[in-house]
Amino acid sequence: MRARLRRLSAFAATLVAAALLPTAPTPAHAESNGGTRVMPLGDSITEGTQVPGGYRIGLWQRFGSGNYRVDFVGSQFNGPASLGDHDHQGHPGWRIDQIDANVVTWLRNTNPRTVLLHIGTNDVLQNYNLSGAPGRLSALVDKITATVPNADVFVATIIPISNAGQNSAARAYNATIPGMVQSKVNAGKRVRLVDMHSALTTADLIDGVHPTATGYDKMAATWYSALRSVPGSIGDPVAPGKQIVGIPSGRCADVPGATTTNGTQLQLWDCHGGTNQQWTHTSGKALTVYGTKCLDASGSGTANGTQVVIWDCHGGANQQWNVNSNGTVTNVQSGLCLDASGYGTANGTKLQLWSCTGQSNQQWRI
């Protein structure tokens, strides 16, 4: 009996020890659309604490509206379905030194064209050797520019903090950043200053540290303005796409609600010229929307009735389309035609694949 109890006690101790061991983080599922690589780099404000996705949501929307094709990069992944690219390099609770210890690996793994750096808030909150924070930031910027010398590095002043004493420390830290950035510029490095502190007030904070959704959107607007001021930092706007108009209905192939959610089935809708109705037929035979999503035969289906949806572009045959002189649009994998379900012509009619019949519900003008 005692031996059994000893075995049970040892087993329980093993379970407790195992529970206390740190667990490995779940690897990020990288999303790539082949666009200009931009790394959002920093702490929880980059990650989007309180509002998952944070400023990246509004920034992504602005990229789409401006016809910029951008690929967020990083080892982390979060945000809502409406955020078309969830990759980032934001680490809640991390200070400058912790980012510095890992940044070379991250940069080598993703080779960003542009880096958005907002870091230092946790140095202030943790009162971590604040007199040395400017020097640590300068060394971090040097490490970034040495690793990716052709990248534009946008260095932001940190946003306000509700606590008066901590905000005073943040202001003192921020005051050193313009001179540091200018010294890098004078040395021929591609470093840019972004005044993020003045873009928000403490009224834009949800918990005294992290922004509200409105505050994050103000950050997005500030980043976007800075990026557009530097040619090439987010590439060049792509030419707007064309509408795919059903012949009998006069209505357009439309992504419902202008969503970017993978698996959303297309419909017919009154043509209005929005980005969710703008399609580009690429040299690889893809039909892209938003510059980042592809017209897709759902589940690589080849049967009649297969839904036609949007999905992240991957170059598969189920995302390749022939735009034919007879007015049909056929899927390369299946040979089936883009079809307005049930010969429908009304708003909301779903689009699908169907055997080519020569009927008008399979006729399109692009």
Image (cartoon, rainbow, N blue to C red):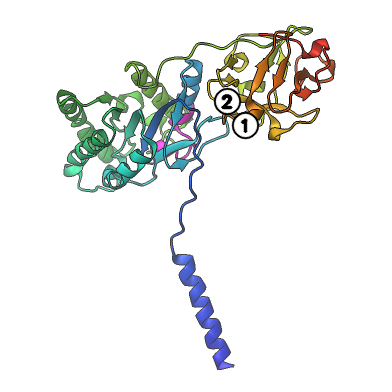
The answer to whether residue 307 is left or right of residue 109 is right
Q: Badges 2 and 1: C-beta atoms under 8 Å apart?
A: yes
Residue 186 position in % (x across, y down): 15, 23
Q: Can residue 207 be seen at all in this image of the molecule?
A: no
What residue would you read off at disc 2? 293
Location of residue 173 by image quarter: top left
Residue 75 visible, this orientation? yes
Q: At 80% from the left edge and 28% from the top edge, which residue is drawn?
A: 305
Choose the circle earlier in sequence order: 2 or 1: 1
Magenta range is 46-57
Q: Residue at x 61, y 17 (%)?
A: 276
195 horizontally vs 55: left or right: left
- Classify 66 as above or below 42: above
| Quarter assignment of residue 210 | top left
Number of residue marks: 2
Residue 54 in magenta stretch: yes
Q: Position of residue 199 (x, y in %)?
A: 34, 24
In this view, 186 is above or below 269 = below
Does the magenta run of residues contain 14? no
Q: Toward which corner of the image does residue 329 lie, by quadrant? A: top right
Q: Quadrant of the N terminus?
A: bottom right
Q: Residues within 10 Å of mark 2 (few under 14, many from 20)?
A: many
The span from disc 2 to disc 1 (Cα, nearest Å) is 8 Å
- Residue 271: image location, x then y, percent: 67, 9
Label 1 sits on residue: 262
